[in-house]
Image: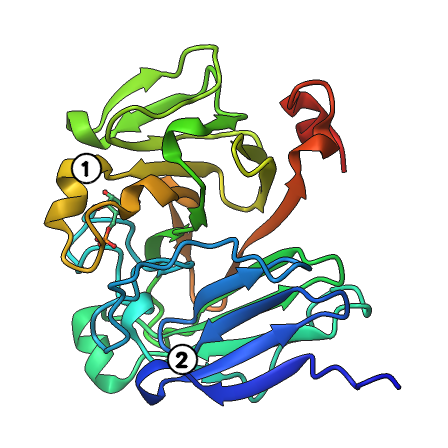
Amino acid sequence: MSTEIVYVERRKGVNGLEKVILREVRGSSAEVYFYGGHVTSWKNDHGEELLFLSSKAIFQPPKAIRGGIPICFPQFSNLGPLEAHGFARNKIWVEDPDPQPFPTSSTNKAFIDLILKPSDEDVKTWPHRYEYRLRVTLGPGGDLMLTSRIRNTNSDGKSFSFTFAYHNYFLVSDISEVRIEGLETVDYLDNLKDRQRFTEQGDAITFESEVDKIYVRTPTKIAILDHEKKRTFVLRKDGLPDAVVWNPWDKKAKAIADLGDEEYKHMLCVEAAAIEKTITLKPGEEWKGRQELSAVPSSYCSGQLDPRKVLLGG
Ligand code: TA6
C-alpha cells in the first residue's frame, strides 16, 4: 500500500508562526517560515539535518531567526543606513497569489512562492516600492533551490540600489575539520580588518579562529567539505558574484545572545551574495539571484575529496 506524499504542507510553527514543509519522494524535506521568507530546515533522504539552527533561536518578530537561511535585503551587514542585513529577514512574507511563471523543470512539485511588498510604514524606512518574489524549491534529488526576483515598482521614476545575501548557515560536525574549496586565490574584503582587500592563498580554506570575509567575484561553485561527516555541500550560484564566509568563533559566539556558547563549532556560514557592486534597478526593471545547494557523500568526489571533481562535475 503506497501512501500519497504531501509535497507542500502548510502548518503552524514555533510561536504559531506560519510555515510550509516541502517534501520529496525519497524522503528529503525543507521548512520555510513566512516570517523572513526564512528556510529553517533542510533534510536529506535519511532525515539528517543539513542546516544549522541555533538552540537559542528566537522565533519572535522583529528578531531574525538565528540559523537556516536568513535573507539579507536590501542591505548586507551594516554597509548602509538601514538595520544590519536589511529588513527582509524580519518581515512577514505572504504566499504569492500571482506567482510569475518560473522556467523550472516540471518534475519539481515541492516548492513555495512567497512575496514581500512594502507597507506604507515600510516606505518611511526605505522610500521605495518593490515586489520581491521568492521561490524555494526542493528538487526530487533533495537539492534546495532559492530564486529571488526583485522588481522596482516605484511610480515616482526613481531607481533604487541594494546589496543582497542568502546567509546560509551550514551544519557541520566540527568547524576545525571543515574546509572550503573554490575560493583559493580569490580577493576578499576582511570584515575583521576594516574591510581591507587581500588575496586568498592557494590552499583550501580551513578554520582555527574567527573569520568574516567577503570574497569578491568568486567562481559559481563552492564546495564545503565536512571531513568527519564525510559530506560535501556544493553551493552553486547565479547572479550573485560574491560569497561571504563567517564563523564567529568562541569569543564572539559568547557575545551573541541567541547563539549557544559552543555552537560556533557546528556552524559555518557560506553565503551567496551581491555586495561589492550594488545592484541598481530602474522602475520596471527586475533582478534575479539564484542559489542551489546540494549535499553529497564525500566519497562521491573520490580521490581523497578532490574538490575539482565536485567543482567540475554537474
Ligand atoms: O555575514 C557575516 C555577518 O555579516 C557577520 O559580520 C556577522 O555579524 C553575521 O553576519 C551575523 O549577523 P547578525 O546580524 O545576524 O547577527
Quadrant in which the N terminus appears: bottom right
Whole-number angstrom distance, CA of label 1 to CA of label 2: 34 Å
Q: Which residue is mark 1?
A: 250
> In the displayed structure, does residue 116 sit left or right of residue 220?
left
Q: Quadrant of residue 191?
A: top left
Answer yes or no: is residue 277 visible.
Answer: no
- Residue 133: x and y, percent? 51, 72
Residue at horizontal 28 percent and vertical 54 percent from the top? 75
The front one of 232 and 312 is 232
* Image quadrant where residue 74 sits: bottom left
* Residue 149 picture location, percent across and down: 52, 64
**Number of marks present in the image shown:** 2
Query: What amino acid is at disc 1?
Result: Asp
Give the position of the C terminus as an image quadrant: top right
Q: Which residue is mark 2?
A: 93
Of residue 145 and residue 60, the one placed in the foreground of this image is: 60
User: Of the residues under marks 1 and 2, which one precedes in the sequence?
Assistant: 2
